[in-house]
Amino acid sequence: MSDPVLRLTDVSRVHGTGAAEVHALRGVSLEAYAGELVAIMGPSGSGKSSLLTIAGGLDSPTSGSVTVDGQDLGEAGISGRAKLRRTSVGYVFQDFNLIPALTAAENVALPLELDGAGRRSARDAARVALEEVGLDGFADRFPDEMSGGQRQRIAIARAIVGERRLILADEPTGALDTETGEDILKLIRARCDAGAAGVLVTHEPRYASWADRVIYVRDGLVVDEAGETPSTVFAVEVEG
Ligand SMILES: Nc1ncnc2c1ncn2[C@@H]1O[C@H](COP(=O)(O)OP(=O)(O)OP(=O)(O)O)[C@@H](O)[C@H]1O
C-alpha cells in the first residue's frame, strides 16, 4: 500500500500544568490514505477537535509525530507548517469561518493568493471550485447574502481549491438541516473519491456512514475502530 496522506504516531496533547493539566489526547495513532474518508466519533470533550487541529498543523502535539504527505510537521517549523496548511490541507469548520467582507470567490481564492498565486489565476481556480460545489453564479455574492448550506459550500470550495490532498472537517454539518448536511457530506465524499484523504469529525452516525472507517475516541484515546461497512457504526452503538 502507498504511504498515507496523514499519519499520526503516538500523539499526545497536554494543556495546562499541575492541577490544571488536561490530557486532550493520549497516544493516538491513525492513518488516512488517499481516496478514503475516516470519521472520528466520540463524546463531547473526548479529543476529536484536538486531533483534527493537530492533524492540520493548527496546533502541535506535546509528544508524538504528525506527517502530511510524508512531511513531518514537527520538522517543518512554523513557516513550513503554514505553507503546508495553505497548499495541502483544506479545513472545514462547523461555523464556516468565512470572511464576511469578501465575496464567495474572494474567500475561496484567499489561500491561493496567500500562497503567492496571481490574483487572476487564484480567482479562476476559485470559480472552478465554486462550480464543483454547485455554486456557479454565486461567485460575487457575499456570505451574508447566502443560506447556511451555501455558506458551507463556499467553505468546502475553499478547502478543496488548488487540489488539496487532505480535507479535515470538524462537524461541518452541525449548523445545517439533515438534507443540506447530506449534500455537504456528498461533496466531501466526492473529493475523497477523486483522490484526497478526508477526516471527518461528527456526532451523527448518519454522516459517519459516508466514511470508509469510523474511529472512536474517548478520554483522548482511540477506543475502537469499527469495520468497513456503515452498518458497523450502528452495531457498535447498540452493543456499547
Ligand atoms: N486550549 C485548551 N486549553 C485547555 N484545555 C483544552 C484546550 N483545548 C481543549 N481542551 C480540553 O481538551 C479536551 C478535549 O477537547 P476537544 O475540544 O478536543 O474535544 P471534542 O471531542 O472535540 O469535544 P466537542 O465534541 O465538545 O467539540 C477537553 O477536556 C477540553 O476541555
Image: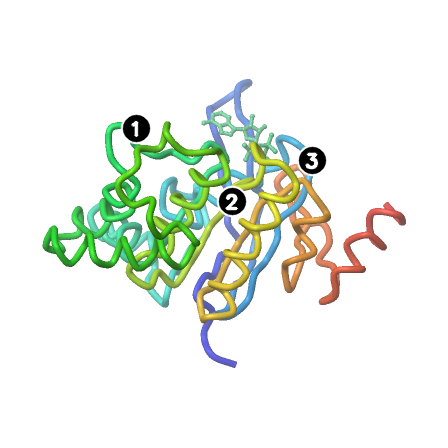
Q: How many angstroms separate mark 1 from mark 3 (CA)?
A: 32 Å
Q: Is residue 86 visible?
A: yes
Left or right: residue 46 compared with residue 71: right
Asked if disc 3 is less than 8 Å from ligand 1, the answer is yes
Q: Which residue is mark 2?
A: 51
Residue reaching furthest front? 137
Residue 239 placement (x, y as % from top left): 89, 49
Residue at the spot x=82%, y=52% of the render?
Answer: 234
Q: Which kind of residue does numbered mark 3 sit on?
A: Pro
Q: Name the disc covering residue 100, or none.
A: 1
Which of these two is toward me, 25 or 112? 112
Looking at the picture, how far across and down is residue 179, in whole percent? Answer: 64, 44
Q: Secondary structure at mark 3?
A: loop
* Rendering coords of residue 35 (x, y %): 51, 70
Which type of secondary structure does the marked residue at label 1 adopt?
loop
Q: Residues within 10 Å of mark 3 (few under 14, many from 20)?
A: few
Question: Which numbered tag is attached to residue 43?
Answer: 3
Check disc 2 and report its element: helix, strand or loop: helix
Q: Is the C-beta of the residue carrying label 2 under 8 Å from the nearest atom of ligand 1?
A: yes
Image: 93 above or below 29: above
Q: Earlier in the sequence, mark 1 or mark 3?
A: 3
